[in-house]
Amino acid sequence: MMTPLLENRRFPLSQHTIGPFFPADYFQPGDNDLTRVSPSANPCSTGEPFTLTGAVRKEGGEPVANAILELWQADASGRFRHSEDPQGDQADPDFLGWGRAWSTAEGAYSFHSVRPGPYEENGNTRAPHLNILVMGIGLMRIVETTLFFPNFPAENAKDPVLSVLPEDLRHLLVMRDNGVIDGVRNYGFDILLRGQRGEETPFFVT
């Protein structure tokens, strides 16, 4: 017969850890550059290049160091280099479409890519967007969300994923246009892992 102490005990699950942990060589130069299929390759020549910069923060605005961010997206023509894309064989062979970055002690991160094109999905037109996930120490699960460009308000309004959110929260997934910096368009997006309604970054369950 189990004692009340054992009956009330809660055993930790696999996600109840303080990890994940990554070795120092987990990241390589150029991992955050989606425009190259390898560090030694030339960047793709199709599409409008941009840089995405921002910070990962937790409740109260405190920066999150050593968070791992992964970003994936369509190429400039709206195609993915993936077997599930019916037009995947037509995707830009010089565009990787996937990258990994990590946050500094100040929570800062950056990616370099080209602006993706729209595409059809389940009969709906997807606005140009970026898919991003975040892993980090203390997070009990990977969190995922989708970022939208401020240059396409009409397309954003019709996007089936952005439309899932209440209208007053949709602006939280639209990147800032920081203008042209060193000849390249810069967008900004800060990720708030936890906060009040209207401040916390909306995440999606997949």
Image (spheres, rainbow, N blue to C red):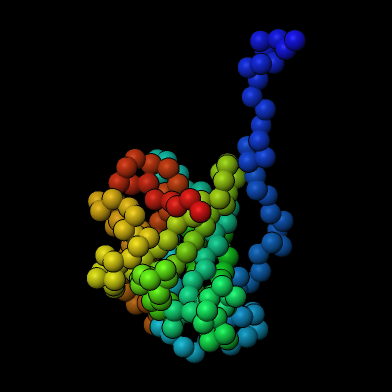
* Residue sticking out furthest to the bottom: 45
Location of residue 124 by image quarter? bottom left
Image quadrant occupied by the N terminus: top right
Question: In this rendering, would 77 be left or right of 159?
Answer: right
- The answer to which of 152 and 36 lies nearer the viewer is 152
Q: Residue at x 39, y 50 (%)?
A: 202
Give how far across and how far down residue 186 sits, in percent: 38, 72
Q: Residue at x 62, y 86 (%)?
A: 41
Question: In this rendering, would 183 be left or right of 80?
Answer: left
- The answer to which of 144 and 105 lies nearer the viewer is 144
Give how far across and how far down residue 70 sits, in percent: 55, 62
Location of residue 24 by image quarter? bottom right
Is residue 185 at all visible to an observer of this figure? yes
* Residue sticking out furthest to the right: 1
- The answer to which of 111 and 201 lies nearer the viewer is 201
112 up-or-down from 43: above or below: above
Is residue 186 at all visible to an observer of this figure? no
Q: Residue at x 53, y 76 (%)?
A: 85
Location of residue 43 by image quarter? bottom right
Q: How many marks?
A: 0
199 up-or-down from 176: above or below: above
Give how far across and how far down residue 117 sits, in percent: 40, 79
* Residue sticking out furthest to the front: 123
